[in-house]
Image (spheres, rainbow, N blue to C red):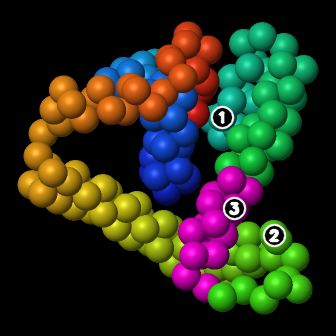
Amino acid sequence: MTGMIGSGVFVTSGFAVESLGSRTLVLAAWLVGGLVALCGAVAYGGLARRLPKSGGEYLYLSRSLHPFCGFLAGMVSLTAGFSGGIAFAAMTCQEYAKGILLLPAWMPSQTLATAVIIICFLIHIEAGRVAARLNTSIVLLKILTLMCLIIFGYSVVGWPSAVAEQSIQGASTGATIDGFAMTVVWV
């Protein structure tokens, strides 16, 4: 959840506006992505009800299709889903921290991201419940931050006007179905 809000919302929104050039299209992509995620959650909920055992995606695919399908899904989840998501979140943290911290020039570029992963790993190893509470606190803080930004933005800037929408679209190279699909994938 923290990765979805932090790396997903805060980082990919700029790429989505750049790719699509319109706030309306970005919101439409977020809506489509949300519906796809909701369908996935409903499907997993149904599978969990039919197979109430530990194992998740691996178990569902192994039992319903073939054990090799479960193995492949498990490997993709391990390498792309979990490891990739952790790496992306750590690199996002590093990019934001570069603006605040004065890192020495001799330090390798991924040192901070690696340190973030190691620190989180150690916290989870030592105190799983503390880590779970910390994760929940971070999610709540991110949601509160988003709400404050939305309220502040609308109270100071106001509702979007046609002029603002045109200026964003004027800077765009034009939205394509490929750009929309890629934005939905990032959502």
- Decide if residue 135 is in sight here: yes
Quadrant for residue 114, please give it.
bottom right
Assess disc 1: are there few (<14), some (14-19) or many (≥20) residues with their C-alpha within 10 Å of its C-alpha. Answer: some
Residue receiving disc 3: 91
Q: Could you tell me if the residues under marks 2 and 1 are in contact, i.e. CB atoms within 8 Å?
A: no
Residue 110's label in the rendered image is: 2
Q: Residue at x 66, y 70 (%)?
A: 94
Q: x, y (%) of residue 166?
A: 30, 26
Residues under labels 2 and 1: Cα distance?
Answer: 32 Å
Mark 1 vs mark 3, CA separation in Å: 27 Å
- Report the side of 183 relative to 22 (left or right): right
Q: Nearer the viewer, mark 1 or mark 3?
A: 3
Q: Tags 2 and 3 in contact by the CB under 8 Å rule?
A: yes
Residue 48 % position (x, y): 54, 28
Which dot, 2 or 1, sits closer to the camera?
2
Tell me the element at label 2. Answer: loop
Across and down, in percent, residue 24 comes to: 31, 24
Residue 37 in sight from this viewpoint: no
Q: Looking at the image, which residue is at 39% across and 70% down?
A: 137
Could you classify mark 3 by the number of other residues whose Cα lies within 10 Å: few (under 14), some (14-19), or many (20 or more)? many
Whether residue 93 appears in magenta in the rendering, the answer is yes
Identity, as a three-letter code, of the amino acid under mark 2? Gln
Q: Earlier in the sequence, mark 2 or mark 3?
A: 3
Residue located at (16% from left, 32% from top): 161
